Amino acid sequence: MNVLYMFSAAAGLIGFTSCLYFAFESHKEQETRATKMGMAGALVLFVLTMGLFIPFIKSVVLILFMAAFFLSLVLFIPAKPNAAALKGSKGYIKGVPVRPDERDTVFARFRSLVPGSKAYQTYYTDLHPEREAGDAKRRERGFLGKPGSIDHEYQPNVAMMHAAFSIPPMLGQEAFSNPEPDVNRADLTPEKAALIVKNFARHIGADRVGICRVNTNLLYSHQGEVHYDRGENWGKKIKDLPPYAVVFLTEMNYDHVLSAPHTPTVAESAHLYAKGAYLSTLLAKWFSYMGYTGVAEHTRNYHIPLPPLAQDAGLGEVGRHGYLVAPEMGARCRIFAVLTDMPLSVDTPVHLGVEEFCRACKKCADSCPSKSIPRDEKIIHNGYSKWKLDEDSCFEYWSKVGTDCCICMAICPFSRPNTFLHRVVRTFVEKSWAAQVFFPYVDNFLYGKRWRPKSVKPWLKYKEKPDKEEIY
Ligand code: SF4
Ligand code: SF4
């Protein structure tokens, strides 16, 4: 047997084993179609490899192996790094940046505008009269619907959600930490300070941490969410915030996310909002005991949309669905931050191949039940090029199911568990031109395009509505 045949037989054996491994991992991830595809691939490779030993067909099989080998070399053509991604949020400026107004966000409109109040009148009379009728109808139906309605309001999971969401309000009043009186300003180099704060954040529970200077164009122009009877703050101009941001991610458990849009996802989101409120408040306090200001950015105290801030801090890229896509966890993460005036050395934005992959993938857009994610090219919004999510229709769906849905997060190929298999694929997507162009189609072929929730562990098993309509 000459060397070409031996080489092909070895390649066939490796391919066969890889397919079985893929099928095994996919089975663990409850990816039925991918499991079958892996098994089918293993069978085909087994038959082809055997064909190398059958005299009448072995030359044809050899040609097939050689063709596959030369085709696979295309995977090693390096990708051009995404110059825009490497500049962070500033790389996407395509006009004159306009600061977003928090008063326009869905949460600010429905939680902070009380009918009959001065803020309500100002918003719907002076600022956005075109929104009044639609928002009024929405208020009548209830903003977020009945918690857990998709699962018959299954009490254990809904209670996990309520319990976790009750924590940030306890901490929001402590979000601003001024320098403690009688404390000397710590005299650290920016490098040493960054080393300490990042390790401290990881030690107390953050999964990834990055630091950046705040791009002031990203800050909300006016305050829209008001809490603790501080109604007078509605519409206040946002200014004079500290210039550095310590941004951190907390990873959502895959076992919860795979049930999207059922109650385990919202229980996990709520858990991380509580954790993020605690971590950011603790970090902000640390800065105050170091003689600096710390402002905790969490669900009770936002001044800035966090995905582009995380991008600036080198934590990932923003995907078509508008979530951050981070290494190892993809979109399965929640972002929090602390703004501070302590000088810190900053991180550089990263390129992961997300934008290139998203162009062809569109899985989140195709699976979004409310069609809130665009399938088209990016648009210019507030002077930035982005895929613009329709927040209103997204939240409308949340109110229908009584959870925060998370289907787009769950179906994103980058969100798969951080196993060896997916790490290899992510590395190719980051570095290989062919992977960025062809893998979205391969992914759709292997895993399918539409989302179906998977089974959760027994302790999270919810009670499905017996009369459940088709809602995803
Ligand atoms: S699902 Fe696909 S298109 Fe959507 S963000 Fe993830 S990679 Fe991009
Ligand atoms: S959370 Fe659900 S409804 Fe909202 S954009 Fe994602 S998939 Fe669509």
Image (cartoon, grey):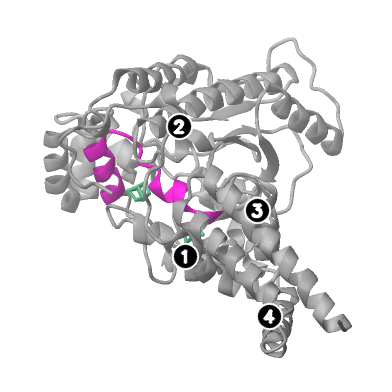
Task: Give me the residue at 69% from left, 59% from top.
Answer: 17
Give how far apart the Cα atoms at labels 3 and 4 are.
Answer: 20 Å
58 or 199: nearer the eye?
58
Q: Amino acid at mark 4?
A: Ala
Q: Nearer the viewer, mark 4 or mark 2?
A: 4
Judge whether residue 395 can be spotted in this image: yes
Q: Mark 1 or mark 3, which is nearer to you?
A: 3
Query: Could you tell which of marks 4 and 1 lies nearer the N-terminus?
Result: 4
Q: Earlier in the sequence, mark 1 or mark 3?
A: 3
Determine the image quadrant of residue 41: bottom right
Mark closer to the chain start, 3 or 2: 3
Q: Which residue is mark 4?
A: 68
* Pointers 1 and 3 in contact (C-beta within 8 Å): no
Secondary structure of the residue carrying numbered label 4: helix
Binning the other alpha carbons within 10 Å of mark 4 as few (below 14), some (14 to 19) or many (20 upward) gives few
**In x, y percent, where is residue 288?**
68, 19
* Residue at the spot of label 3: 21
Residues in magenta?
Answer: 392-413
**Residue 373, numbered label:** none
Q: Which mark is residue 444?
A: 1
Q: Amino acid at mark 1?
A: Asn
What amino acid does circle 3 point to? Tyr
Position in image of residue 273 (x %, y %) = 48, 28
Query: Label 2's element?
Result: helix
Residue hosting label 2 = 269
- Is residue 396 in the magenta section? yes
Q: Which amino acid type corresponds to the residue marked 2 in the rendered image?
A: Ser
Look at the picture and state if 291 lies above or below 126: above
First in sequence: mark 4 vs mark 2? 4
Residue 99 in view (yes/no): no
Q: Mark 3 vs ligand 1: CB under 8 Å?
A: no
